Image: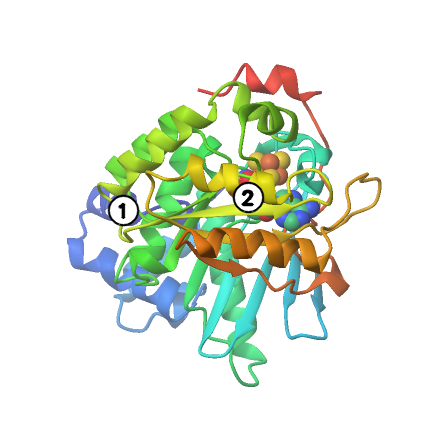
Amino acid sequence: MQQNLLDFDAHALAGYLAGMGEKPFRARQLMRWIYKAGERDFAAMTDIAAALRDKLAQDVCIAAPGIMHEELSGDGTRKWLLNVGTGNAVEMVFIPEAGRGTLCVSTQAGCALDCAFCSTGKQGFNRNLGVAEIIGQLWWANHQLGKDADENWQISNVVLMGMGEPLLNFDNTVSALRLMLDDQAYGLSRRRVTVSTSGIVPAMDRLREECPVAMAVSLHAPDDKLRDMLMPVNRKYPLKELLAACRRYLEHAPRDFITFEYVLLDGVNDSVLQANELVRLVREVPCKFNLIPFNPFPQTLYRRSRPEAINRFRDVLMEADIVVTTRKTRGDDIAAACGQLSGSVQDKTGRTVQHLAEVP
Ligand code: SAH
Ligand code: SF4
């Protein structure tokens, strides 16, 4: 099979071209064609020598995952279902807002971590996405949005908050992040690219060293007992360790706070008492909170907290001088809201206890 150039980060591309006796500037030129111009036909890359174009066309390709399905929500949110082969599909979502456009990208087909409130987790885990499948989502979205652009289609922010746990697909995620940040590719600032994690502590430390970008951590409970129940990964990396990792991350982070995500589940984690506990818990971590009203999906037993409970919870945090936003639910008419992404994943490996043993 032909190598896919979307699988190469800048370093790998330079290495590949050097192997063909080409100068480093060729790699930069090629990257601009692929990512800035969104070109996948070597013949159209007119400032590259014809002989090299022919050779590239023979040896390699530029291929993003194919789109199986596109849906447009009443609020402008778009969801694409991407074919990642062997019966698996993952989803990506574009959320236009005044002055910015956020692309929510998936990093795995399914997820092994089985959080109690997450539709992706309920699908089980199939496999990690490759670099081309991760960066290819951005490539596709740019291509599609540019094609039938009406107004606000620019992708100004990327969040790795789609299907999967990015830090359990570390190497591919980091290569894709580097392309997002690279000036020859998408040139996004580190502050505008956010990794969301359920709290894989050693991988948070690696990310801090290798490619620090903005960090969102899914907290969802103020104590270990409840978090163990909602997020089995907590048994491996309990809150004390997780919060210490957050503090360490901030030493290199492009922003001076961690964003904590907190899904509000009616009668489970939304009391005033729990909000107060949460304030005590995060006392030593500069942070902002993103409260997420639970998005239901078929077969879930959880319910979204009532608006009064959400407001009360928010007020307790705000009284403690924590900046809080309550996430507006976007795209829920097309099941594109957080935690509703399920694509169609063939679980290969069975249940979670087993997966947790594999977590580094
Ligand atoms: N695996 C990573 C990133 C993907 S999940 C993580 O867990 O952080 C992205 C966010 O959606 C997480 O904060 C997750 O807790 C949240 N989420 C999952 N299921 C949800 C649901 N049903 N309703 C609202 N948010 C949900
Ligand atoms: Fe995986 Fe994140 Fe869903 Fe938990 S919330 S199952 S970590 S995708």
How crowded is the residue under tag 1: few (<14 C-alpha within 10 Å), some, or many (20+)? many
Looking at the image, residue 52 lies above or below residue 209: below
**In front of the other: 352 or 266:** 266
Pick whichever of labels 2 and 1 is earlier in the sequence: 1
Q: Report whether 229 appears left or right of 201.
A: right
Looking at the image, residue 137 lies above or below residue 14: below
Quadrant in which the C terminus appears: top left
Q: Quadrant of residue 275?
A: top right
Q: Which label belongs to residue 271?
A: none
SS class, disc 2: helix
Q: Is mark 2 within 8 Å of ligand 1?
A: no
Q: Position of residue 48 (x, y in %)?
A: 27, 67
Q: Which label belongs to residue 253?
A: 1
Q: Which label belongs to residue 275?
A: 2
**Residue lying furthest bottom:** 150
Is label 2 or label 1 in front?
Answer: 2
Q: Amino acid at mark 1?
A: Ala
Looking at the image, residue 304 lies above or below residue 300: below
Q: Position of residue 319 (x, y in %)?
A: 45, 55
